Image (cartoon, rainbow, N blue to C red):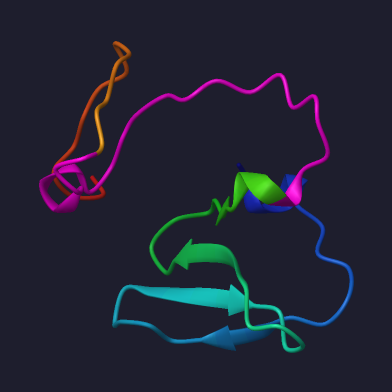
């Protein structure tokens, strides 16, 4: 979602997980919450953060090259072996 449409309330700790992105975590339990690429104006977040119903649909599957062999993708959303 566009970063301008996203408001974070409460404390978040950020970790520079690579030279291209950072991740936001809950400082109390350590749960991964957010993911932000440095070259984009959007933020990704764990859908478990949203109270249902979300009315969201997937627009792509990412990192499919690393998915477990037990995980079957059964929809028509595009699949990307990596993020882009």
Magenta range = 49-70
- Residue 18 appears left or right of 46: left
Nearer to the camera, 36 or 56? 56
Q: Residue at x 53, y 54 (%)?
A: 41
- Residue 43 appears left or right of 77: right
Q: Position of residue 17 (x, y in %)?
A: 38, 83
Which of the 4 image quadrants contains residue 51? top right
Q: Position of residue 62 (x, y in %)?
A: 28, 42
Image mark count: 0
Work out which residue is located at the far front of the displayed protein and give it.
Answer: 70
Q: Residue at x 59, y 52 (%)?
A: 46
**Majority SS type along the magenta span:** loop
Q: Residue at x 67, y 48 (%)?
A: 48
Work out which residue is located at the far right of the displayed protein and give it.
Answer: 10
Q: Residue at x 73, y 51 (%)?
A: 49
Can you say which quadrant of the picture contains the N terminus? top right
| Looking at the image, residue 56 lies above or below residue 27 | above
Nearer to the camera, 47 or 29? 29
Can you say which quadrant of the picture contains the C terminus? top left
- Residue 21 appears left or right of 63: right
| Looking at the image, residue 12 lies above or below residue 79 | below
| Looking at the image, residue 23 lies above or below residue 33 | below
| Looking at the image, residue 65 lies above or below residue 21 | above
- Residue 28 appears left or right of 18: right
Q: Position of residue 21 (x, y in %)?
A: 39, 72
Q: Is residue 56 magenta?
A: yes
Q: Is residue 43 magenta?
A: no
Nearer to the camera, 74 or 37? 74
């Amino acid at each position: 979602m566009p970063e301008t449409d996203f408001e974070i309330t409460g404390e978040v700790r950020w970790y520079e997980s690579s030279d291209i992105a950072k991740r936001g975590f809950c400082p109390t339990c350590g749960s991964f919450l957010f993911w932000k690429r440095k070259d984009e104006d959007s933020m990704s977040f764990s859908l478990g953060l949203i109270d249902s119903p979300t009315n969201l649909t997937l627009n792509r599957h990412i990192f499919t090259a690393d998915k477990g062999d037990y995980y079957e993708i059964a929809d028509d959303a595009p699949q990307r072996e990596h993020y882009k």
